[in-house]
Structure formats: C-alpha cells, structure tokens
Image (cartoon, grey):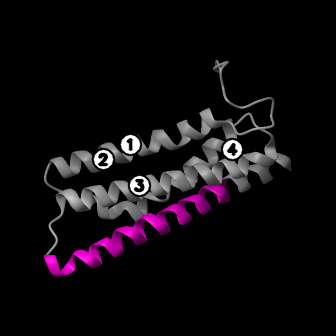
Amino acid sequence: MIREENNTEQAGTGFDTGIMVRGVLAPLIVWGVVVGLASWSGTPGVACATPIAWLIGLWVGNYVAARSRSHPSRRRIEALISGGVLGFLMGVLFYVVSTLAMPVRPEEEQRALYISLGIIIFGTIITALLSLMTASARSRRASS
C-alpha cells in the first residue's frame, strides 16, 4: 500500500490525522447514505437505529490502531478521538433527520430535543469508549 507523503504525522511524535479522518469518514458516509436513502424513501425512522450504529466504533478503533503510523502510545488516543468524533457526527445526523423528516407534536418538541441531545452526548461517549476498547485490545495482542 502506498502512503501519502504529506501526512500530518511527524516522525512518530504527532497524531496520524489522515488515518483518523479516514477512520471516521468511511463509516460515516456509509451510515449517512443508509439514513439518507431510507429517509428519502419515506422511512426516516431508520435514524432511530443510531444507538446500534455506535457499534461501528469497534471497527474505527481497530482501523485506527492497525493503520496509524504514530507512536504506539498515541494510537489509543487517536482511536478515542476518532470514535468520539464519529459518535458526535452520527448524533448530529440523527438530529438533522429527526428535525427535518420526523413529525413531532408541538407539546413534544422539548422532549424530542432532549432525546436528540442524549443521542449526541451518549453517542460521543459510547462510540469513543468502544473505539478505545478495540484499539487497546489490538495493542495488547500486538505486544504479546
């Protein structure tokens, strides 16, 4: 595999941001397409499966830990950040779809907002932790 020479990672001292971005964008694009197509076809409720999509954080942690060229001690942090960003963006996607495509009665608008905030906050935390867990497991296997 050919690596890009203009990677922002500097000689093992910084984060491998290229891998982090790819680790977030690949599953986010897939999830976005699934939710977008389902919403467009009249089934916006698929966005309610976002908590199950947080499991994609497991893949992100493995991807970042396996491909990062940064120092091994930083790979867990990279996986944590990548998972958190993915969870946050999935939550924002949930909010956008639920606001635009799911009807809410006026008396339930505040409750819908709280649910969206919960999805964003818990999604960020849970996806980050799942990603960290997988990266840590990979690191332990590699060192033994």
Q: Which mark is residue 65?
A: 4
**Alpha-carbon span between mark 2 and mark 1:** 6 Å
Quadrant of the rendered image containing residue 109: bottom left
Quadrant of the rendered image containing residue 130: bottom right
**Alpha-carbon span between mark 4 and mark 2:** 26 Å
**Alpha-carbon span between mark 3 and mark 4:** 21 Å
Query: 115 or 79: nearer the eye?
Result: 115
The local crowd at label 3, few if under 14, some if 14 to 19, many if 20 or more residues have their Cα within 10 Å, is many
The image shows a total of numbered marks equal to 4
Residue 70 % position (x, y): 76, 37
Residue 124 % position (x, y): 51, 61
Q: Does the magenta segment cover residue 9?
A: no
Query: 142 or 124: nearer the eye?
Result: 124
User: Circle 1 sits in a helix, a strand or a loop, which is it?
Assistant: helix
Residue drawn at x 54%, y 36% as measured from the top left: 22
Q: Are marks 3 and 4 in contact (CB under 8 Å)?
A: no
Q: Are marks 2 and 1 in contact (CB under 8 Å)?
A: yes
Left or right of 1 in this view: 40? left
User: According to the image, label 3 marks what residue?
Assistant: 90
Q: Earlier in the sequence, mark 3 or mark 4?
A: 4
The kind of residue on which mark 2 rests is Val
Left or right of 84 in this view: 26? left
The kind of residue on which mark 4 rests is Ala
